[in-house]
Amino acid sequence: MKKAVLAYSGGLDTSVTIHTLTEEGYEVHAVVVDVGQTEDWDQVIDRGNKAGAAGVRVIDAVDRYADEILSKAIKANGLYEAKYPMISGLSRPVIVEEVVKVAREVGAGAVGHGSTGKGNDQVRFEVGFFVLAPDLEILAPIREAQLPREKAIALAGEWGIPIDSVGTTYSIDENLWGRACECGPLEDPWAAAPEDAFARTAAPGARPAEPTEVVVAFERGVPVALDGQTSTLAGIIRAVDGLGGSYGFGRVDMVENRRVGIKSRELYEVPGALALIRAHQALEEITLERDVAHHKPIIEQRWTQLVYDGQWFGPLREALDAYVDATQSHVNGDIRLRFEAGTCTVVGRRSEHSLYDLSLATYGEGDAFDQSDAAGFVRLFGLPLKVWSQKQRGK
Ligand code: ARG
């Protein structure tokens, strides 16, 4: 029997995919990668089995996701279109790797995904498979069938796949780095997001009145401790995400540009991701030399685009990460974050390697900056414009 390994999420589309592939004569091995999503695994396994899978495997990759991928996203301040921490784009490489591993183990000739033809995830899965397993056939039955969501729901019902708990109004993708929500009422960009679209951030009326502060310690650009308590990166992300979420911080409502050319309205809940990137940027403010600080965002933007576009396994992403790493050797220190209803603010920063020099910055006593140096500097700095104004500006 032909064997296929499917990147299974437990959701509507991938459950329907299992059934479709089974009907096409495949023995389907469903692989769910735990990248930190909140999930009832028994239910996910049960749904996969009822959909017809030969087996459903849950693979724990939470720490690997944090250590090998999210650490890089923090160092690169990865925000697509300056807002979106790429929770889907960052998790797909781990899923692709795990699916390929299982495909080799069971001797499958094909790998599959449940993405539609309208999104970014098909690109991320398939380009990943092209690199890691160019010999395997790729199956994408949802894209082939061009199934509207309503039809997929009806088919699941017809085929006895229990989807009541899958949440059929919205399409959700969730992991340690945050939660994405699309479809349903969100498709109207003028309509305010209904409160039931949120799950990870407290509603305006349910946020604590008192602010709270937390100190994030970084080593070489990566968070290593919270309030002096060392922890795994996954542990730190979870804690900051939970805290930020309880304050209702981290809601992003945006219209983004997908790789396939569509503008789509997306709702993200990313308290931990935004707070940690913000903290990392604040630490870079005091530890990066000026020219590095000005150049790095150009590299960050390219890095972010590559990740969003599914080019994780390519050589440019690796080369850019080497650049980013070279900038991080002194990004060590502490950032104090304050959470208040709906907000997260950097209120303090300190580092052994800080380039902030009080004797240069102060307007008070102990000033070591000789202001008489400035007059000649400004004269030469402004000389080209002065000459231009005299000769060409016209009156
Ligand atoms: N648009 C985002 C991205 O491409 C999120 C996709 C999330 N998927 C979902 N089924 N809601 O990265």
Image: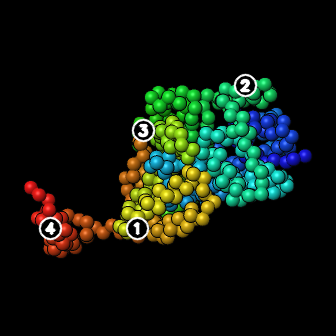
Assess whether mark 2 and mark 1 are in contact (beta carbons under 8 angstroms).
Answer: no
Say the numbered circle drawn on residue 263: none
Say the numbered circle drawn on residue 341: 3
Question: In the current view of this chain or complex, which residue is farthest to the right?
Answer: 1
User: Can you tell which of label 4 and label 1 is closer to the viewer?
Assistant: 4
For badge 1, the amino acid type reads Val
Alpha carbon distance from label 2 to label 4:
74 Å
Residue underneath mark 2: 154
Residue underneath mark 4: 387
How far across and how far down the image is residue 31, in percent? Answer: 76, 47
Q: Residue at x 54, y 43 (%)?
A: 261
Q: Is residue 345 shown to the viewer in this render?
A: yes
Q: Residues within 10 Å of mark 3 (few under 14, many from 20)?
A: many
For badge 2, the amino acid type reads Ala
Determine the secondary structure under disc 4.
helix
Assess whether mark 3 and mark 4 are in contact (beta carbons under 8 angstroms).
Answer: no
Alpha carbon distance from label 4 to label 1:
31 Å
Q: Is residue 223 shown to the viewer in this render?
A: no
Foreground pick, 184 / 140: 140
For badge 3, the amino acid type reads Ala
Q: Residues within 10 Å of mark 2 (few under 14, many from 20)?
A: few
Determine the secondary structure under disc 2.
helix
Alpha carbon distance from label 3 to label 2:
41 Å
Alpha carbon distance from label 4 to label 3:
53 Å
User: Can you tell which of label 4 and label 3 is closer to the viewer?
Assistant: 4
Q: How many marks?
A: 4
Residue underneath mark 1: 292
On screen, 92 above or below 193?
below
On screen, 346 above or below 289?
above
